[in-house]
Amino acid sequence: MSDYQTTPIRVERSRDTPRQRVSTSLDTNGSLGIGGVRNDWTREEIAALFELSFTELLFRAATVHRAHHAPDQVQFCTLLSIKTGGCPEDCGYCSQSVKADSGVAATRLMDVREVLQSAARAKDAGSQRFCMGAAWRNPKDRDMPAICAIVKGVRAMGLETCMTLGMLTPRQADMLAEAGLDYYNHNIDSSPEYYERVITTRSFGERLDTLANVRASGINVCSGGIVGMGETRADRVGFIHTLATLPRHPESVPVNALVPVKGTVLGDMLAGTPLAKIDDIEFVRTVAAARIAMPLSMVRLSAGRESMSEATQALCFLAGANSIFTGDKLLTAPNAGDDNDAALMAKLGLTALEGAEPLRSMALDETTVA
Ligand code: SF4
């Protein structure tokens, strides 16, 4: 089974542009300053970012972005579903839930060798990180040896690894850390208030517990959410506020636009309404607010990108998005496709990320100092 095209993403490495110096200072430059890393954001401050004129917001986000990241570089990640469908959770947006009538068939966990073959294709296609998702409430302990073998195998290929397997116990997080997992993805999805209207089978608090277990194990945290689920702007503020006030910001923050799938609760609820697609400008505002509130994190344009115009994606990059999923499929949802991405990167003059991510560099510095 292959979810991915093998056409390499032909992106030029930047030769003439000097590498952006990455600042890892922990100063606090004020709520709308250019780069102080803060964990004491208030909802009012985040809301004030959303209220700025679009031009002012983008200017500030771009200023913060270039203070910490190379503004012409984008990270390429590939996402593979290693266990699809049949999930007992009831996430209202997800076609893999047993509660959804979406026609997604349940599969078993993929064979280790099969996963490694997909990873090799992703690497050949120019991917830098291989993310793997399993539609589980949580992994069973009996699954852990195979999962750890996959992590070790993908890492041995020189790819970064990320897993999203549902809730993790501290022991499972430690096992993944020992296997060398670089990142664990566990999204908070939305504000605490709106979350409860989308998912009932596990609480927002349980999501935060898993993030804490991942953080304690030393694995880098990937956590973001979905916009366009019918939530209000106040919920988008609450979503960013939750992430930006974690004890340490996630190293990676995926921002998804809902892909409404027929048969899912949200897909059916929003179909034919004005809420069926998030407004492009509001989506860019959300990316910009995430960039300003979490200056050192990688902000990833994730699901929903294939239905975005090139101009909207360009605005997102200007607003501080600097990571994308490549390939023509994201788990079960369609994605932009490598050829389209290569053409867009060339058109925008963007190149593949070189060097370490700012938050991870900072962690290394801290280790060295300690
Ligand atoms: S989002 Fe994840 S946990 Fe929720 S139903 Fe889908 S696969 Fe299950």
Image: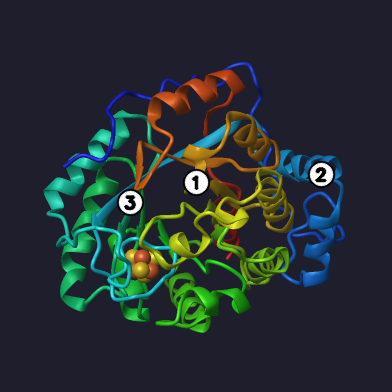
The answer to whether the residue bearing label 3 lies less than 8 angstroms from the nearest atom of ligand 1 is yes
Q: Which mark is residue 54?
A: 2
- Residue 251's place in the image compared with 269, above or below, is above
**Residue at the extreme front of the image, as rendered:** 272
Q: Which mark is residue 331?
A: 3
| Foreground label between 3 and 1 | 1
Q: CA distance from mark 1 to mark 2?
A: 21 Å
Secondary-structure class at tag 1 = loop
| Quadrant assignment for ligand 1 | bottom left
Going by the image, does 61 lie left or right of 334? right
Name which of mark 3 and mark 1 comes first in the sequence: 1
Q: Is residue 87 left or right of residue 237?
A: left
Residue at image x 32%, y 67%?
A: 100
First in sequence: mark 1 vs mark 2: 2
The image quadrant of residue 264 is bottom left
**Residue at the image point whose x is 77% and y is 69% from the top:** 41
**Residue 60 image position (x, y, % from top left):** 82, 45
Q: Is residue 64 left or right of residue 343?
A: right
Amino acid at dot 1: Gly
Q: Provide the secondary structure element on which disc 3 rests.
A: loop
Rendered image quadrant of residue 238: bottom right
Numbered badge on residue 304: 1
Residue found at x 81% / y 46%: 57
In three-dimensional space, the C-alpha distance between marks 3 and 1, rounded to whole angstroms, equals 12 Å
Q: Amino acid at mark 3?
A: Leu
Q: Viewer-proximal residue, 218 or 183?
A: 183
